[in-house]
Amino acid sequence: MGYDPGGRLQLGKYTPYAISENEIGFLVLHIGVGLERHYNIGYQRQPRVLLVCDTSNAMVRMIEATLQRKYPQLEIAATLSQREYELLEAVAEDFVISTVRIGEKDKPVVTIAPFPTDYQLDQIGKLVLVDRTRPWMLDKYFDEAHFRVIDTPIDRQTLFAELCQQLQEEGFVDAGFYDSVVEREAIVSTMLGDGIALPHALGLLAKKTVVYTVIAPNGMVWGDETAHIIFLLAISKSEYEEAMAIYDIFVTFLRERAMARLAATGSFDEFKTVAMECVSRF
């Protein structure tokens, strides 16, 4: 995440307002996410569905063809019989489409006829068109092992050393990651705004992508500002395109003015509950 410093000089020609480095960083992030949404670029997680059908193979293929013609973004993960479905302990897919009446297993179920009506297809469409990217990103890249609450004074460099050491021991990054994070922070503060900081390396140096979440309820000195929530980003080259959607989560936190609620959380479960409420709202 970065921008051309010369752009700041150019902005001065067109506006009488002083724009800080942090504000420019926020604008870059916000505009980038906006472009991705408007032009439908960037990573989007497509909906996955479980099809439950007790009809012939030919009828199953016809139903699959109907669904994919109507909703080409829909991924039919598996097709099961009613008996096979009933034996499942849980459903991994986003929702279930069934030609027979079945009970829910914590996921929505849409019952359709072998020849789905327009109304039934519309009901499916309501589930297909839900944006699942941000909740899925939250599940994939944020976890309890990489969450901590700090209520004692600590400086940025010490915090970076502790977090990076853990990530290195776990195989997420190499030894050079810490130095790169420190160097990046020395160039310009990674404070996003509203008490949220996004420290990260200068390049895509991680072996695996992860977000380390740190809550500082009493605040932590971050240059000339105070950070209450720190998200250390470790992003790998192989997951770069997908992981860019993580930034949309941070913009959502700002838009929802969620900093106070997030900073008050004392456990990962509490944090995830508040975060999920924010990212699921749109």
Image (cartoon, rainbow, N blue to C red):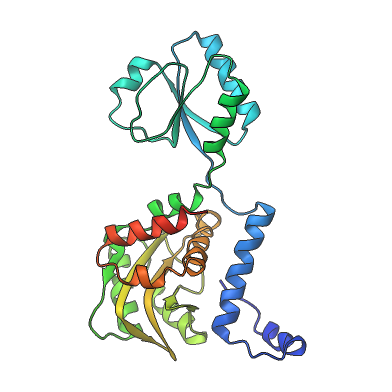
**In x, y percent, where is residue 119?**
59, 25
Left or right: 165 in relation to 256 = left
In the image shown, does 212 or 152 lie closer to the viewer? 152
For the N terminus, the image quarter is bottom right
Left or right: 114 in relation to 148 = right
**In x, y percent, where is residue 89?**
27, 29
| Image quadrant in which you'd find residue 209 | bottom left
Report whether residue 175 is seen: no
Left or right: 1 in relation to 226 = right
Identify whether 96 is placed above or below 250: above
Which residue is farthest front?
Answer: 119
Q: Residue at x 37, y 21 (%)?
A: 102
Q: Residue at x 61, y 72 (%)?
A: 28
Q: Residue at x 40, y 18 (%)?
A: 101
**In x, y percent, where is residue 81?**
39, 16
| Image quadrant in which you'd find residue 268 | bottom left
Which residue is farthest right?
Answer: 14
Left or right: 242 in relation to 168 = right
